Amino acid sequence: MRKSAIRRSCAALAAVTSLALGLTACGGTTKNDVKDDSAGAATSGKANPNAALKKGLTVGFLPKAVNNPYFTSSDNGGKKALEELGESYKEVGPSSATDTSGQVSYVNTLTQQQVDAMAVSAQDPGALCTALKQAMKNGIKVVTYDSDTKTDCRNAFVSQASAEDLGRTEVQLLAEQIGYKGQIAILSAAQTATNQNTWIGYMKDELKDPKYKNIKLVKVAYGNDDAQQSFQQTQGLLQQYPNLKGIISPTTVGIKAAAQYLSGSKYKGKVKLTGLGTPNDMRKYVKNGTVEGFELWDPAKLGDLAARTAVALSSGQITGKEGETFKAGDTTYTIGKDGVINLGKPTVFTKDNIDQFNF
Ligand code: RAM
């Protein structure tokens, strides 16, 4: 039991009984007391940038969905970093990106297992809050990565890139490809996904610029990060809007399924497609003329930074406040507003550079 949990149950115990056994146990020093006290700066709310990184920590990764290859890459990046630092890694998570209650149960599981920190990609911004707050009360550090929750429900958010940049550049990429004219649609992931919804917000804002006055966003469809549903949604978009000129799919599962549909249809090369995809998934569609350009960050680097952030938090080097700095690998990161840490700039992939990437 963690120190705070011990304190709570001791208070309850003291209130109802004066059982000598219980009080002795509460007054004693347990292994976990020592462990939590050594967090020092972190528990007292002040960062100690010179604190040594602890070893032997357990960090649990909880992606949106475990069977999404994007998260296999990101979480493997986290695993590698943790092994290098002398920590333990575990991964739990639902198999569907729309199983929000499943994600809540996995947060509770990690809390019960007394992990030192968890890295979570939230399917829904609010749904995990109660469970994540309970985890933090138990002394567990909570990092969101890839898709955030509310700011008070985690210690820090490791963001793949500036959300604003991602949203705006996807519109810019598609606008150029369709000659700034025609109907466009968005094929997103789950309707509740924080990351996709934030990017879509910036896409809509970008489209307000007069240079896009001849472009009309006709629909936002949701493929739920499921290959079959995304494929069917793409098919449905083209049935409903036969004059559609382009699609933005800001999800690796969505863009791959949309490319697969377009590439086997009469729309190949005519309906433009961009968004966020992995070079390995998209290579053949770039080479066969279905897709001109799309973007992404390296998911393994995102997982690596999430893991190192979790360890820095658990070691008391940072607490998640704006302005704190810490070293992850060779790079020094500064925590920004609302506890956000940015990995860096995404890469745009085209036929000219795609073969240089293998993820
Ligand atoms: C999917 C997931 C993930 C997102 C990527 C781009 O794999 O929705 O959250 O960041 O696409």
Image (cartoon, grey):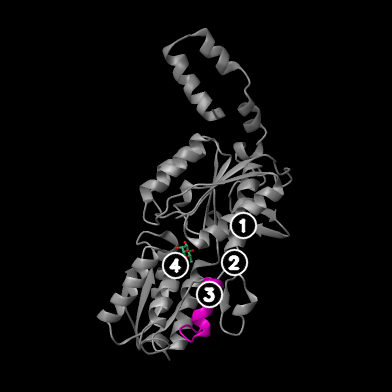
Based on the displayed image, in which of its 4 quarters is residue 43 positioned? top right
- Quadrant containing the N terminus is top right
Q: Secondary structure at mark 1?
A: helix
Element at label 2? loop
Q: Does residue 313 appear to the left or right of 225 in the view shown?
A: right
Taking the spot 47% from the left edge, 9% from the top edge, the residue there is 18
Under mark 2, the amino acid is: Asp
Q: Which residue is mark 2?
A: 298
Which label's residue is closer to the chain start, 1 or 3? 1
Q: Is residue 291 above or below residue 91?
A: below
Mark 4 residue's CB less than 8 Å from ligand 1: yes
Query: Is residue 359 something that shows in the picture?
Result: yes
Q: Which residue is mark 4?
A: 253
Q: Which residue is mark 3?
A: 295
Q: Residue 141 or 296: which is nearer the viewer?
A: 296
Please state the horizontal and vertical placement of residue 13, each as a whole percent of the image. Answer: 46, 16
Estimate the spatial distance between the alpha carbons at disc 3 and disc 2, rounded to whole Å. Answer: 10 Å
The amino acid type found where label 3 is placed reads Glu
- Per the rendered image, the range of residues in magenta is 278-294
